[in-house]
Image (spheres, rainbow, N blue to C red):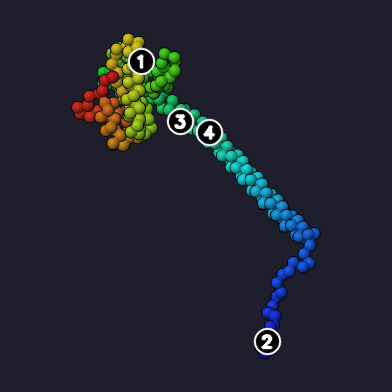
Amino acid sequence: MEATVNEKPIQGKEPPTGEGLTFEKVWVMFQEIAERQKETERQMKEDYERRQQEEAERRKEAYERQKKLDEKFDSLNQQMGGLHNSFGELAEHLVAPGIADKFNELGCHFDGIASGGYKIRDDKKKVIAEVDILLENGDCLMAVEVKSKPKPKDIEHHERRLKILREHRNKKNDTRKIYGAVACAIWTAAEKQATIDAGFYVLEQTGDTMQMAIPDGFVPREW
């Protein structure tokens, strides 16, 4: 007689059988999932639109701030430009007679003085260069640049200015010699030497008077 083994059911949760689930219940579950997904998408869209709106407002505010700053900067530039021009014109008018006297002491005897900005124009009447003070007589012209404190680039600019003046005068059949000078209130030794090396006369303020610095062996450049 064969022995039998008493089989006992495995303790634990019974495997799902799907009992109790109906189409209606499953359909409701899908609807709930769809609604939750729809709500999540709606919230994400609202968050995105809100961030976009906030970013647009920040950009607009930044633009308005920058616009106001630009307007203030432009206004300040105009004010400073007007002040600079007024100071420059005043300085040129004040120093022009004294500069002419200094050159006259050298025997130049300039009888013509154009101060306040002698403009050089091209054939279309466009200003292509401007000389602060232009002295002239029957033999030569002296183009003077007036600065409170010169910079290295000022020397180069004055050289180009005299070249333009030379070409301009040639077109008028004016063959008079052209020389250059730089008058400044504050000089450094290096800038003064660079000006002399370029062949320009150096005029410097000393107390209440203007002095001409002419080193031994100085030969002015002729244009």
Work out which residue is located at the far top of the displayed protein and give it: 173
Q: Nearer the viewer, mark 3 or mark 1?
A: 1
The answer to which of 181 and 5 lies nearer the viewer is 5
Q: Position of residue 10 (x, y in %)?
A: 68, 79
Residue at 32 percent of width and 17 percent of height: 166
Does the CB distance between marks 4 and 1 fall below 8 Å? no
**Mark 3: secondary structure:** helix
Work out which residue is located at the far left of the displayed protein and give it: 217
**Mark 4: secondary structure:** helix
Residue kind at label 1, given as amino acid type: His
Question: Alpha carbon of mark 4 to alpha carbon of mark 2: how far?
Answer: 107 Å
Residue kind at label 3, given as amino acid type: His
Residue at 70 percent of width and 80 percent of height: 9
Give the mark, 4 or 1, whose residue is nearer the N terminus: 4
Residue at 67 percent of width and 86 percent of height: 5
The answer to which of 126 and 158 lies nearer the viewer is 126
Badge 4 is on which residue? 74
On the rendered image, what quadrant is the N terminus found in? bottom right
Give me the disc on residue 42.
none
Residue kind at label 4, given as amino acid type: Asp
Residue at 76 percent of width and 56 percent of height: 31
Vertically, is 122 above or below 21? Answer: above
Question: Alpha carbon of mark 3 to alpha carbon of mark 1: how far?
Answer: 27 Å
Badge 3 is on which residue? 84
Q: Position of residue 86 (x, y in %)?
A: 47, 27
Give me the disc on residue 168.
1
The answer to which of 62 and 46 lies nearer the viewer is 46
